[in-house]
Image: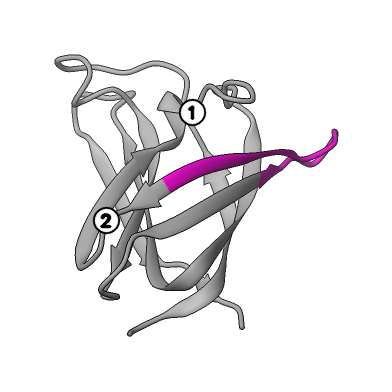
Amino acid sequence: MTGKHTWAIPEGYIPEGSTGPEPEMRSHESLCVLNTADEEATVEITVYFPDREPVGPYEKTVPAERTAHFRFDEFDDPEAIPEGEPFASVIESDLPIVCQHTRLDSRQAENALLSTIAYPGE
C-alpha cells in the first residue's frame, strides 16, 4: 500500500462566479485520492475556517485499487462549503492513501488551474 493515513490541505477557496459550461467548468476545489490497497478506503474530511468552528466529517469512500475525485463545491452533508471564503481541510483515512489538491478558477474566460500534492501527515 502507498500513502499515509492523514493529509492536510492548508489552502482552500471556492471562487465565486464562473464562465464556461456547467458543471465541468464551474470554479471549484477538488480532492484527488489514490487508494492502492486491495480493499475500499473510508475517508473523512474535516473543513476548517478562519472565523468559525470546523465542519465535518464529510465521509467518502475510495474503491480498492482506484482513484476518486471529490469536488468541495459538491459537499453538502453536513453542510455546503461556502463560495468566496477561505478554508483548509484535513483528510483522514482508515487505509494509507495519497491525496492531491486541485483548483479550477474559471471566473475569467482564461481559466486558471492549480494542483499540488497535499501535506502528508502520519
The circle on residue 63 is 2
Q: Which residues are magenta?
A: 47-60
* Of 39 and 50, the residue lying toward us: 39
Kindly identify the residue that appears in the image at 63 percent across and 49 percent down. 88
Q: CA distance from mark 2 to mark 1?
A: 19 Å
Quarter of the rendering occupied by the C terminus: bottom right
Which quarter of the figure has residue 5? Answer: bottom right
* Of 42 and 6, the residue lying toward us: 42
The circle on residue 10 is none
* Mark 2 crowd level (few <14, some 14–19, many ≥20, 10 Å Cα): some
- Residue 78 screen position, x and y as percent: 64, 25
Kindly identify the residue that appears in the image at 32 percent across and 18 percent down. 18
Residue 3 as seen in the image, left or right of residue 52: left
The answer to whether 70 is drawn above or below residue 34 in the figure is: above
Instruction: Name the secondary structure under disc 2.
Output: loop
Q: Residue furthest front?
A: 39
Type of amino acid at the residue the image marks with label 1: Phe
As for residue 117 lying within the magenta part, the answer is no
As for residue 58 lying within the magenta part, the answer is yes
Instruction: Name the secondary structure under disc 1.
Output: loop
Kindly identify the residue that appears in the image at 48 percent across and 31 percent down. 14
Residue 47 as seen in the image, left or right of residue 34: right
- Residue 81 screen position, x and y as percent: 58, 27
Quarter of the rendering occupied by the N terminus: bottom left
What residue would you read off at disc 1? 75
* Mark 1 crowd level (few <14, some 14–19, many ≥20, 10 Å Cα): some
- Residue 19 screen position, x and y as percent: 24, 17
